[in-house]
């Protein structure tokens, strides 16, 4: 017995669809078993709300009179990339303000736009016969822009290492402030609610999948940068998946700052908290087996961030049940743990998505192309120029 | 019963120990040390919370002054802007006192002010500046 995307969409249309969040499905499977749960439930919603550096937005400002071919662009003093076309630019989340440093970056510009605030646009040009104007200095709002869409090259990490610090000094990282001598452990995945841990083999999630993106409906545009498929069998038959990432796209004009927040990590810089929800169709019992995954069966490594190298040593392997318990054992000591991504808000997103499917406002989109099965994660060949 | 947070400054030749003993014994105060910076030969600084009747707190502070211990009320406190908070948890990673904590059921951030040391570590840890220090209450 199987279900197709079309059959599930028909149920969404008629209002018969049964949806559960990836947390709720665990209890349903426990009570009723895989077979019955797969028959009864049609869609499982997954979600995450965490810091995702590889984010940004394309914007089109419209033409001034006389027109300018903007080749250097700043938004609230944050450089945006203008080497695209006359009045197109890309504002990246981690680009920093030239006047406010680590406190304010591209992520904040994006959040300010979404919040409806005025943003100062400065642009320079070398001037051409067809675009004679040399500079522009004005204010814009999201409403004024012709197009503004979020395009994040790498979001929704399948799984992410937990972080600790074995050195004698406090360090500030994108995994938060790490206290000396393994004073704390931080982690940043929503575990059993996490999208790519619920469809670890990418059976239903692919290019074209419709998703909840920061308050509106967006799409998976491509594999995320650095996409790889890592799959490690752990002794007792449990599999550790990691490496999957997604490139996502959606209309900034319909987004909501509740699910798109600019953040600044001390002595690191800016990043963006992005809320993403992905509905997973329960095509068959095998799919339900994946969806029933619990924090106990999801493992990650605890990595020492005090080693300033590309490959940092992994101190131990840990499951999310232990991470979520508030402390883990590390070399005989109990170390407090803290999340960096908000489980509370991820749950909210999973529920918002669930309700919009139930109300018949959100339909599933079958991928137009599946994710690659083989990809290599290559380092930079830093051979110099000699 | 009243509570008061004060910073006590000890002259280099005084140690805090017998002094706190008198406060507890003679003025019937609950004496809760929030932060101590005491080094031999240097001016010491002790941030304490005193709990007792208003009269006893006043008398105890008068006793302190007579003994060369200066004090000033400690007005700083930590405030969390609930509207801004994303319940991410980055601040609990560094909070040394457990004043900031997450409920393991709803995974929301809670703040138990009575445990707060006003060390201000959470200010730099919060990525959205949802925590602030309030100087006057
Ligand atoms: S000031 Fe220090 S003790 Fe108080 S909540 Fe912040 S980190 Fe915790
Ligand atoms: S770090 Fe800031 S946003 Fe995150 S839980 Fe703490 S106060 Fe809230």
Image: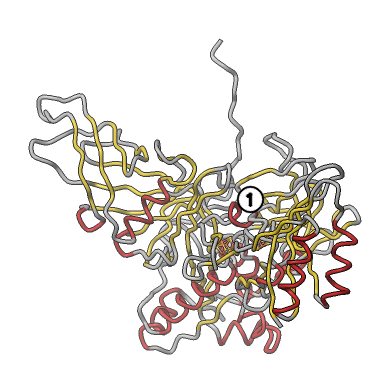
Considering every residue shown, the one lying at the far front of the view is B66
Relative depth, front residue between A68 and A216: A68
Position above or below: A83 against A45: above
Q: State yes or no: Cβ of the residue under disc 1 lies below 8 Å from any atom of ligand 2.
A: no
Position above or below: B34 against A135: below
Residue at image position (69%, 72%) is B114
Q: Quadrant of the C terminus of chain A?
A: top right
Residue A367 in the image, given as x and y percentages of width and height:
44, 62
Residues packed near mark 1 inside 10 Å, few (<14), some (14 to 19) or many (20 plus): many
Residue B9 seen anywhere in this rendered image of the structure: yes
Residue B126 in the image, given as x and y percentages of width and height:
57, 57
Give the residue pinned by disc 1: A175
Left or right, residue B1 beside residue A252:
right
Position above or below: A343 against A383: below
**Colouring of the image:** secondary structure
Relative depth, front residue between B104 and A298: B104
Q: Quadrant of the N terminus of chain A?
A: bottom right
Residue at image position (61%, 61%) is A200
Quadrant assignment, res A127 = top left
Relative depth, front residue between B60 and A39: B60
């Amino acid at each position: 017995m199987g279900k197709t995307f079309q059959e599930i969409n028909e149920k969404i249309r008629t209002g018969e669809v049964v949806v559960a969040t990836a947390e709720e499905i665990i209890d349903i499977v426990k009570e009723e078993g895989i077979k019955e749960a797969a028959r009864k439930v049609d869609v499982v919603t997954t979600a995450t709300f965490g810091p995702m550096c590889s984010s940004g937005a394309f914007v089109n400002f419209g033409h001034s009179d006389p027109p300018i071919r903007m080749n250097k662009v700043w938004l609230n003093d944050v450089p945006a990339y203008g080497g695209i076309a006359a009045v197109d630019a890309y504002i990246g989340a981690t680009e920093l303000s030239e006047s406010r440093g680590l406190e304010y970056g591209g992520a904040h510009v994006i959040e300010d736009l979404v919040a409806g605030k005025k943003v100062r646009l400065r642009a320079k040009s070398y001037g051409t016969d067809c675009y004679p104007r040399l500079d522009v200095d004005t204010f814009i709002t999201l409403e004024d822009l012709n197009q503004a869409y979020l395009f994040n090259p790498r979001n929704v990490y399948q799984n992410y290492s937990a972080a600790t610090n074995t050195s004698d000094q406090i360090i500030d990282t994108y995994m938060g402030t790490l206290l000396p001598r393994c004073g704390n452990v931080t982690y940043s995945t929503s575990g059993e609610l996490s999208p790519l841990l619920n469809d670890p083999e990418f059976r239903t999630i692919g290019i074209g999948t419709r998703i909840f993106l920061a308050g509106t409906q967006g799409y998976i545009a491509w594999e995320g940068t650095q996409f790889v498929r890592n799959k490690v069998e752990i002794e007792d038959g449990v599999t550790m998946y990691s490496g999957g990432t997604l490139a996502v796209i959606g209309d900034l004009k319909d987004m909501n700052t509740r699910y798109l927040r600019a953040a600044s990590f001390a002595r690191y810089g800016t990043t963006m908290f992005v809320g993403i929800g992905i509905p997973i169709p329960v095509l068959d019992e095998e799919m339900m087996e994946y969806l029933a995954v619990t924090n106990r069966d999801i493992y990650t490594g605890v990595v020492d961030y005090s080693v300033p190298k590309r490959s940092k040593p992994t101190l131990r392997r840990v499951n999310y049940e232990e991470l979520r318990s508030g402390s883990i054992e590390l070399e005989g000591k109990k170390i407090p743990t803290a999340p960096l991504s908000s489980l509370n808000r991820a749950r909210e997103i999973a529920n918002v998505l669930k309700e919009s499917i139930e109300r018949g406002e959100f339909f599933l989109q079958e991928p137009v192309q599946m994710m690659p099965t083989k990809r290599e994660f290559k380092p930079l060949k830093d051979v110099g120029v000699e | 019963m009243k509570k008061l947070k004060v910073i006590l400054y000890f002259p280099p030749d005084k140690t805090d120990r017998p002094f706190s003993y008198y406060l507890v014994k003679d003025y019937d105060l609950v004496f809760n040390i929030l932060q101590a910076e005491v080094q031999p030969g240097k001016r010491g600084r002790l941030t304490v919370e005193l709990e007792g009747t208003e009269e006893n707190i006043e008398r105890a502070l008068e006793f302190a002054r007579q003994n060369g211990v200066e004090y000033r009320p400690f007005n700083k406190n930590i405030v969390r802007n609930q509207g801004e908070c994303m319940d991410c948890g980055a601040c609990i990673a560094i909070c040394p006192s457990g004043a900031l904590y997450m409920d393991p059921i709803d995974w929301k951030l809670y703040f138990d002010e009575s445990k707060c040391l006003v060390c201000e570590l959470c200010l730099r840890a919060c990525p959205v500046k949802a925590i602030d220090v309030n100087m006057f209450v």
